[in-house]
Amino acid sequence: MSGRLDSGITTRTHEWPGGKRCVAVLTVDFDGDCREVGRKETPLGKNSHGRYSAKCGVPRYLDLCDELGIKATYFVPGYDAEKHPDLVREIIARGHEIAAHGYVHEGWDPGEQEPALLKKSHDILTPLMGKPPRGWRSPGGSKTEVTMRTLIDLGYVYDSSEKDYDLPFTAHGPADRENKLITLPNNVSSLDDYPFYRVSYTPPSEVLAHWKEEWEAIRAENGFFDLTVHPRVGYGSGSPARVGIIRDLVKHMQDSGDVTFVTLEELADWCIARRDAFARDWEQENIGGTHG
Ligand SMILES: [Zn+2]
């Protein structure tokens, strides 16, 4: 073994919740009309795709999760929570996790405004949830050291924004290196509905086949399957046929007997209790620049 680079990729030794071979999380990024409002668009007519989330998409996912017997993580922007407080309460009442996802889905680096925006959404979500959110996913992918330090100060325990690894890990930038956050990566290229429906308009049946391939490959590696869906129409997975393939996919995975579905918060707590197993000894990385 000496001198051999061990990435942990092909020699995975992680145990997962439930004692299964793999762990999976269904993450539902609410992304209602905050996206249009954040872009200074009037969320009506051709710009009303986001409004579908609260009216149809999120209720459909709540029912689907009940049917499948799984709990999901819903990333809810502060603006959408302000507009739909009863829906936020319903998500919590039905046993799911809510995590933070910007105020108006800032798909840009908010710069000096960021700490105030993170705090604003945090303070909107906390009373609605009856407890503070503990997880965050960057809207649009931007992330800086300031982001991480602010999240740590607000008591967050995980970030789900990185795309440079496919297992949870404890170290990245200097703030993370103090092991105050766990990173739960998300793969926005392959395990996210956005590119299939926004870029290529792939038929749902083909998206299902693709995600089944990803699942089988991750299953072979004893890995972490982190699926991101948006309950909108347009680029999202809120409409009946697109929700239908999530049902088919989850059932297919459950039928394997090799997976436990948890929330990201549950997974973060699992990893935090086993920090050593999720630490990586990459050489200290030079995280240059401020853009995610
Ligand atoms: Zn989003």
Image (cartoon, rainbow, N blue to C red):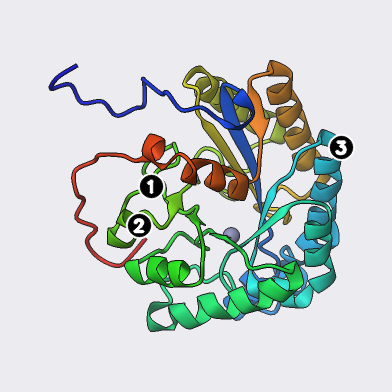
Q: Nearer the viewer, mark 3 or mark 2?
A: 2
Q: CA distance from mark 1 to mark 2?
A: 7 Å
Q: Look at label 3 and name its amino acid.
A: Glu
Reading the image, the residue beneath label 2 is 176
Specify whether residue 195 is in view: no
Q: Residues at badges 3 and 2 in contact (C-beta under 8 Å)?
A: no
Type of amino acid under label 2: Asp
Number of disc labels: 3
Label whose residue precedes the other's in the sequence (1 or 3): 3
Which residue type does callout 1 highlight?
Answer: Thr
- Which residue in the structure is indicated by mark 1? 170
Q: Splitting the image into 4 quarters, where does residue 109 fall?
A: bottom left
Residue 194 in picture, x, y percent from top left: 58, 49
Residue 250 location (% of width, % of height):
72, 30
Q: Residues within 10 Å of mark 1 (few under 14, many from 20)?
A: many
Secondary structure, mark 3, is: helix
Q: Residue furthest front?
A: 273
Q: Secondary structure at mark 1?
A: loop
- Residue at image x 38%, y 83%? 112
**For the residues bearing labels 1 and 2, Cβ distance under 8 angstroms:** yes
Q: Nearer the viewer, residue 215 or 183?
A: 183
What is the number of the mark on residue 67?
A: 3
Which residue appears at 20% of the width and 26% of the height?
5
Residue 230 x/y as whole percent: 67, 52
